[in-house]
Amino acid sequence: MSVINSDRTLDERRRILLVEDEPDLARLIRLNLESLQHEVTQVTSLTQARQQMQTKHFDLLLLDRMLSDGDGLTLCQQLRQEGKCLPCMMITARDSEADIVLGLESGADDYLVKPFSVLELRARVKALLRRSAQQASDQYALTFDELVIDSKTREVTAANQPLALTAREFDLLYYLAQHPRQVFSRMQLLEAVWGYSYAGYEHTVNSHINRLRAKLASSPTSNELVQTVWGVGYKFAPPAAH
């Protein structure tokens, strides 16, 4: 891995919290993200991360799993339980499919396995920030029967009951709902929602779709909205007009 020259592709400076206890890797990540004109705060433990988040606003959390005071997943889970939609990307050496699925089901929006290329890190960070900024700039809500997807507040309600979605789950649902009945392949969803289309990451889409369906299933009016088109991909199927 190496440091790449400055790339001014984002419109504004963002605050990124990096939780990583390997000094050389942390320095490499910080230098590359600072070259994108971001402000990076680096800490080495979950305790320090929580202290930073109590006093500062961050636009992105980069989080290692194996830390001196616990598993980074616990922090991600805590944020989701508190209803916070801070985009979170796990950066970890734990590369089994079970670990990746667990990370995504715990609320992570992305999962990057060590060792990784700097180009992939930068692409994923830019994609997360871009999707977050695009969603924040939207000014209207999508309504389907008793399901309301508000892009301004990034809240979803079903039969007037709030659904606790992660930032990535919201982005995925919102994108599908913007194109009702249109079928998207997994690679198309990776490109549109995650911002990249690397072969081999289709399981990421599958995991998020399954988690999204499980949460929509809590409302009987919403549990069939995201459908599988076998051999092709997924679509959003709004209820028929009464």
Image (tube, helix red, strand yellow):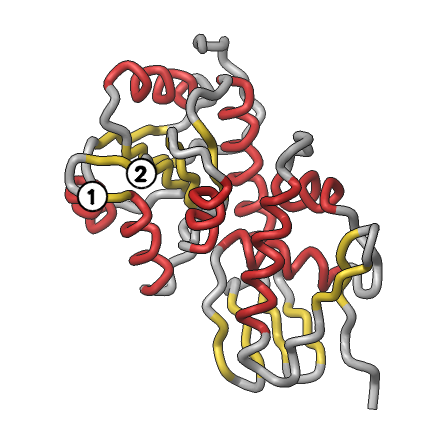
Q: Nearer the viewer, residue 211 or 23?
A: 211
- The residue at 16%/40% (across/down) is 48
Label 2 residue SS: loop
Q: Quadrant of the C terminus?
A: bottom right
Contact check, label 2 and label 1, Cβ < 8 Å: no
Residue labelled with disc 1? 70
Residue 207, compared with residue 43, is above or below; it is below
Residue 215 in the image, given as x and y percentages of width and height: 53, 70
How dense is the environment of label 2, judged by Cα within 10 Å: few (below 14), some, or many (20 and up)? Answer: many
Label 1 residue SS: strand
Tell me how far mark 2 sits from mark 1, CA to CA.
8 Å
Q: Nearer the viewer, residue 61 or 185?
A: 185
- The residue at 38%/21% (across/down) is 29
Q: Quadrant of the N terminus?
A: top left
> Which label was assigned to residue 183?
none
Residue 221 in the image, given as x and y percentages of width and height: 65, 84
> Which label was assigned to residue 65?
2
- Mark 2 or mark 1: name the one nearer the start of the chain: 2
